[in-house]
Image: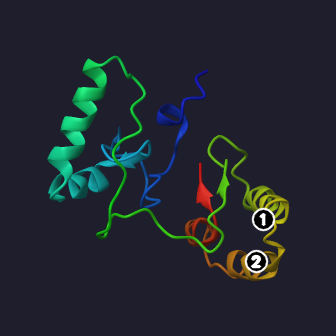
Amino acid sequence: MSHDPFFTARRCQRCGGSLDGGRTMSMFNSHVICMACKEKERQRPDYRDAVEAEMKAVRNGDRNFKGIGLKGGEMSEKKTQSGIHVKLIGQDGNIFNLIGIVLRALRRNGRSDLCEPFKQAVTSSHSYQEALAKIMEFIIVE
């Protein structure tokens, strides 16, 4: 079984939505995104620049081009309270397991001050989807 995020991701890494309707890679970074986010990308004024940069990289042999990055606008990468990257994709999706992983990452990265607000936000959620969205307000999911 492949551990490539393209095949294992269950949620869009940009909006958190379902990937059931299809998935693709972002032209701006290495995120796996849903088709709705892809359509939003196509509307960006710098989309052509992103496509051209990727084509140039591929012609030069770079098969793992990371993109030109997002520069402002509604699709800019989300700012999180911690800025900490945490590998959750491919982990056991039990919400309590995810909470534990994030709490350990917060502590390990010197952000123990966020542990209580994080636990409160996630455990007061009314659905699994809302809890996942709250997690993504605190960390950057990988």
Which residue lies under the disc numbered 1? 106
Image check: 135 left or right of 92?
Answer: left
Q: Is residue 14 above or below residue 63?
A: below
Residue 17 circle label: none
Residue 133's image quarter? bottom right
x, y percent for residue 1: 61, 21
x, y percent for residue 106: 78, 65
Mark 2: amino acid: Leu
Mark 1: amino acid: Leu
Mark 1 surroundings within 10 Å by alpha-carbon count, few (fewer than 14), some (14 through 19), many (20 or more): many
CA separation in Å, label 1 and label 2: 7 Å
Give me the residue at 18% from left, 52% from top: 42
Q: In what element is the residue under mark 1?
A: helix
Q: Is residue 57 above or below residue 49?
A: above
x, y percent for residue 28: 33, 47
Residue 114 circle label: 2
Q: Are marks 1 and 2 in contact (CB under 8 Å)?
A: yes
First reached walking from the N terminus: tag 1 or tag 2: 1
